[in-house]
Amino acid sequence: MLTDRHVTTHPYIPPAGFRNAHLQTIYPTLFRRTPLITGERERIATPDGDFLDLDWARQPQNQRLAVLTHGLEGHSRGNYCQGMASALRRADWDVLAWNFRGCSGEPNRSLRSYHSGATSDLQIVLDHIFSNTAYDSISLIGFSLGGNLTLKYLGDQGTALDPRIRSAAAISVPCDLASSAKRLERWQNRIYMARFMRCLRMKIREKARHFPDQLDLRGLDTMRTFQEFDDRYTAPIHGFKDAHDYWGQCSCRFVLDQIAIPTLLINAQDDPFLTPDCYPSETAATNPNLTLETPKYGGHLGFVSFNDKREYWSEQRAVAFL
């Protein structure tokens, strides 16, 4: 139902039995099987002596490229990235799915890793594209944390954005990091928080082997929340005062009004990770470049669909928008 020119509830109709938000969220992780589309890996250097791994799917003389940014503790070859890549390739897009530092299967070299507002690494990827390819039309697609990062980048750039970047889509985005972090502490979300924290603790232990004098592991095993982890590690490692300073500076909700290219934001109303502050309806109503769609169902990075193309609804919707 159309509620405003740029605030819509788009008709995603889940399959029978898939109206449960947790089933929508968990099912793709456990049961979806996607072919590897972006199978050509390229490693590029960062100015600080580190590296980023990029995975490509491309064909000669194609002029348009979609750049995919994955979510927290994900990677470029995850189901939601490869599902989107498959839909894009079918629509004749080249695809680049890049990995955050330390997420490509090999630890990165520096103490710093990635975070929800690390737009400088996205800029490194885009600068590499601008310098080494001839694409004249580039679109950005971000998932969850990667969606926040993508929207933050677009808002920060505003009208100064490179004109080759024409459009964007972001799916299941925690636009307000502070409230989403608290939401994930709820009892009903314990399975997600436990998984995230297990991965984050493992990476800190790995970092400590290479930087033993710079990381304090006391209490790491008992950490159960993002606030504890971000206070101790994410914030100080990346130059923030504490978790709240990090969340405040990096939440995309504060710069959405500055987005200057057509951008689609899809956040399901039943997403267990999101709070009301993650549905920026007022901004979408006043910024003609931002289209907010809030389907009733879909969970977090769900939007399960069964069809001959094996495309999920969010993939079909994003490709159609672009």
Image (spheres, rainbow, N blue to C red):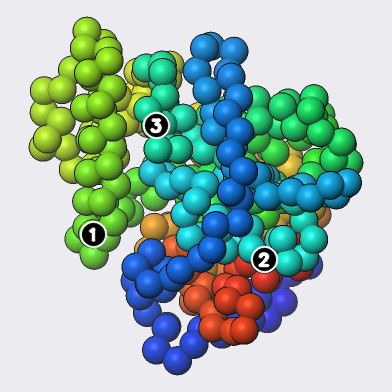
Q: Which residue is mark 1?
A: 191
Residue at screen point 37% across, 24% down: 235
Q: Which secondary structure lies at badge 3?
A: loop
Do labels 1 and 2 touch, CB within 8 Å? no
Foreground residue, 63 or 279? 63
Q: Position of residue 77 (x, y in %)?
A: 50, 51
Of badges 1 and 3, the one in the foreground is 3
**Callout 1 secondary element:** helix
Q: Give whichever of 45, 4 is nearer the camera.
A: 45
Q: Position of residue 94 (x, y in %)?
A: 75, 51
Mark 2 residue type: Ala
**Camera-side mark, 1 or 2:** 2
Q: Residue sitting at 71 percent across and 31 percent down?
A: 126
- Image quarter of residue 122: top right
Q: Going 28% across and 32% down the picture, which residue do you hit?
A: 203
Say few, some or many: other residues with alpha carbon within 10 Å of mark 3 (under 14 / 14 to 19 / 20 or more): few
At which x and y percent is residue 14?
Answer: 51, 84
Residue 313 is left or right of residue 4, and the answer is left
Q: Quick one: label 1, few (<14), some, or many (20+) residues within 10 Å?
A: few
Q: Which residue is mark 2?
A: 87
> Which image quadrant: the C terminus?
bottom right
Whole-angstrom CA distance, mark 3 to mark 2, is 28 Å
In this view, 198 is above or below 301? above
Residue type of the residue flagged with mark 1: Ile
Q: Name the residue rendered at 45%, 68% in the picture.
A: 33
Q: How many marks?
A: 3
The quadrant in which residue 309 appears is bottom right
Kindly identify which residue carries mark 3: 106
Mark closer to the chain start, 1 or 3: 3
**First in residue order: circle 1 vs circle 2:** 2
Crowding at dot 2, Cα within 10 Å, few <14 / some 14-19 / many 20+, comes out as many
